[in-house]
Image (cartoon, rainbow, N blue to C red):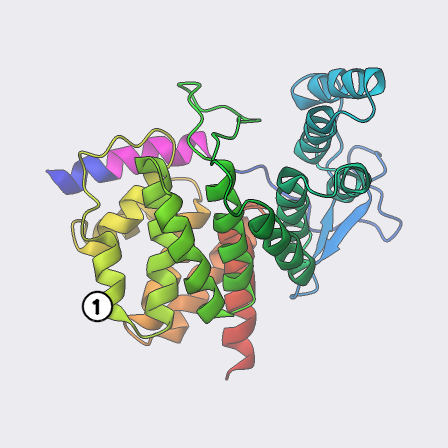
Amino acid sequence: MKNLVLVFFLLAVFACNKPAKENSKVASDSIDTTSKVKRKIEAITVLSDTIYSTPYSKGDFADKLEQAKVTLDQDPTNANAIIWYGRYTAYTGQYKDAIRIYTEGIKQHPNDARLYRHRGHRYISIRQLDKAIADFEMAATLIEGTEDLVEPDGMPNAMGIPVSTLHGNIYYHLGLAYYLKNDLDNALRVYRLCEKSSKNDDMVVSTGHWLYMTLRKLNQKEAADSVVANINLDMNVIENGIYQNMCLFYKGTWAEGTLKKAVEQAPINDVVLYGLGNWAWYQNKDKTTAKAYFEKVLQEGNKLSFAYIAAEADYYRLVHSE
């Protein structure tokens, strides 16, 4: 019965998180031949794939971006105004522009950890991991001895309750950047800090997911098992249900076949597919199955999701380890 509950839960979540399809064939002059809207190159991935900026128009974040620009123009040195203008610029797919906005903000506010935190996030988006790490390490230094504060959401969950903090986000993204570079010792160090900063169940399960995988890759299974030992179905998880269910899978509460069945019956979900691929790799030493899962993420997933970027990096390492 519990397995069926998980399947239906995942089906519902997948349906809500189905990513927009990316046009894989774009003309060399960066013109989307369907919309005829000029798109800028944002990044070239380790697999030589091209990430383009996202054309946008009125509505959604475009309207909020315009308002954020008006607010910033009224007070050009206001750090909050700079941050929100950068955030909405990134939400509309203009990652390099967002980085430039944060960079100008840092010139004015060199000791504001939030600006490094947000710029570092967008360096991850465009696959510049060394720059991301430098920003997050600076942010981590700047928050030493400071009070941790809830970070407002740019894309609120259904309940409108923020589930992350400034300290937690800095450590979470820094750990991720190290993980993506396969610097697992540093990833472990930082995720342990993130674990200590996890103030609610959403933070516990999201950190637990990446920390578990880091420890498994370091061949520390017993330590990995202890990370998910207290994760259960009764937790008050608001928006990170997928991470919760992956942790329950690692714990053994959910069977692998249940997740596979959900994947087969539902739209693509990068987190589940990447997690299953990773599991095949470090649990079963099955590189063929791991590659198949990673390939599915790369073929159908969201190129800006963290699980996609991780699948991209691990697929590259798998191919070049053969």
Q: Is residue 247 above or below residue 214?
A: above
Residue at the front extreme? 145
Q: Is residue 208 above or below residue 45?
A: above
| 9 drawn magenta | yes
Residue 321 spot, x, y in % from top left: 51, 82
Q: Tell me the residue at 79%/32% (across/down).
A: 35
Which quadrant holds the N terminus?
Answer: top left
Residue at the bottom extreme? 322
Q: Can you see residue 301?
A: no
Tag 1 residue: 222
How many numbered marks have been drawn onto this rendered protein structure? 1
Q: Is residue 165 left or right of residue 212?
A: right
Residue 78 spot, x, y in % from top left: 75, 24
Q: Tell me the residue at 83%/50% (across/down).
A: 27
Residue 210 spot, x, y in % from top left: 40, 55
Q: Tell me the residue at 40%/73% (across/down).
A: 288
Q: Quadrant of residue 33?
A: top right
Report the front residue among 263 and 171. 171
Q: Is residue 211 left or right of residue 57?
A: left
Amino acid type at circle 1 is Glu
Q: Tell me the residue at 23%/39% (across/down).
A: 6
Residue 290 spot, x, y in % from top left: 40, 67
Report the front residue among 34 and 197. 197
- Specify the principal SS of the magenta part: helix
Q: Which span of residues is magenta-colored?
A: 7-17
Q: Is residue 279 left or right of residue 119?
A: left
Residue at the right extreme? 29
| 44 drawn magenta | no
Q: Is residue 88 above or below residue 167?
A: above
Report the front residue among 244 and 148. 148
Residue at the left extreme? 1
